[in-house]
Amino acid sequence: MGLLQGGKWVDQWYDTEKTAGQFVREDAAFRHWITKPTPDNPHPKFEPQSGRYHLYVSLACPWAHRTLIFRSLKSLQSHIDVTVVEPHMLANGWEFSGPNQSSDAIHIDGAEPDSLNGHDYLYQLYQQAKADHSGRVTVPVLWDKHHNTIVSNESAEIIRMFNDTFDDITGNTSDFYPSKLRTEIDTLNDWIYQTINNGVYRVGFATTQHAYAQAFDTLFSALDTLEQRLRTQRYLTGDTITEADWRLFTTLIRFDAVYVGHFKTNRNRLADMPAIHAYMKALYQYPGIAETVNFEHIKQHYYFSHGQINPTRIVPVGPRLDLLSPHGRD
Ligand SMILES: N[C@@H](CCC(=O)N[C@@H](CS)C(=O)NCC(=O)O)C(=O)O
């Protein structure tokens, strides 16, 4: 794992020395927006067009997972194609399938070569977009085939674009960020990002006991609050399923399979929190969602890639998960 420095790839783990053992996530660097033409701007640089944009994702990554979920919820499958990277993220960072995969990486079914741009490694796509780029090389990436560049590598913004920008092309007008709930969704998103989405990483990537214990308490106190809330309401904002639910889901679905063991978020499993567990199952059983979840990629990525945490690279066989039984939340 590494990052680009002035356009050159450097193999380096996260630096937590300057932050007292705490993991701090870097902000995404490419932040353009796909926008519909308006009278003021009849020819935006990035217009919604079928077939023009391409998603690079890892099936392991919770942030990339959000974009796959929105691609499915918003009927974008035939308009935005996808390339899936290999789960093993080693000295070259994210890799595509092919003969130049790292010698210690194993090909996992479902990962693909980069048939669009012909790269071996994701960092080469970033170099193609910006030759002197500095920063981490992350998934997801939304690529524009027209300008041959990265539109965005920020999942929170990609799902907002998917939510409404392509509606005229797909005819799918379902709205997961309705105007009347926006303030509440934004507040929930901020809190859930800090405490849960990024919270599990803050627990797992902490390098001091103190930083770990602090992040652990923050995470479980947020989960306790959610457990209470979901006892009395179906979704996070009430009866309507929104973006906030999908952003929470991608962390929940990885929790018992990976975070409890690998990131030591082990006060309890989600299976021990009845309301959250039933809510997670309901989201998993929502049309089009189960197909976006791949536990093989999820487990292979975390357990095999993070040598600092799991040097033997042994990927656990379990746990046996119960995701298809009735959730009882109708
Ligand atoms: N802000 C980004 C974060 C994406 C992110 O951190 N992705 C992880 C995988 S789960 C990654 O690619 N990490 C590689 C690295 O940090 O070097 C987003 O939400 O899109």
Image (spheres, rainbow, N blue to C red):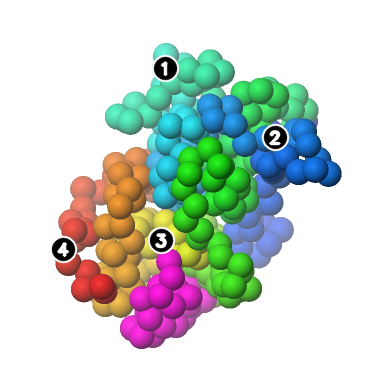
- For the residues marked 1 and 4, what is the alpha-carbon distance in whole angstroms? 38 Å
The residue mark sitting in front, 2 or 3, is: 2
Q: Amino acid at mark 3?
A: Phe
* Mark closest to the chain's N terminus, 2 or 3: 2
Q: On screen, 81 above or below 28?
A: above
Residue 58 visible to the viewer: no
Tell me the tag on residue 325: 4
Answer yes or no: do the residues labelled 2 and 3 have beta carbons within 8 Å? Answer: no
Residue under label 1, please give it. 98
> SS class of the residue under badge 2?
loop
Percent position of residue 225, x then y: 44, 82
Instruction: Answer with the quarter of the image where residue 2 lies.
Output: top right
Q: Residue at horizontal 33%, vertical 83%?
A: 231
Residue drawn at 58 percent across, 27 percent down: 52
How much space separates mark 3 and mark 4, taking CA atoms? 17 Å
Marker disc for residue 141: none
- Quadrant in the rendering for residue 22: bottom right
Foreground mark, 1 or 4, reads: 4
Q: Which x, y percent locates residue 316?
A: 25, 49
Specify whether 58 is left or right of 158.
left
Disc on res. 249: 3
Residue 225 covered by magenta stretch: yes
| 1 or 4: tag closer to the N-terminus | 1
Mark 1 neighbour class, 10 Å CA radius: few under 14, some 14 to 19, many 20 or more: some
Q: Are marks 1 and 3 in contact (CB under 8 Å)?
A: no
Q: Nearer the viewer, residue 34 or 17?
A: 34
Residue type (three-letter) at the residue carrying disc 1 = Gly
Q: Amino acid at mark 2?
A: Phe
Spatial CA distance of label 2 from label 4 is 43 Å
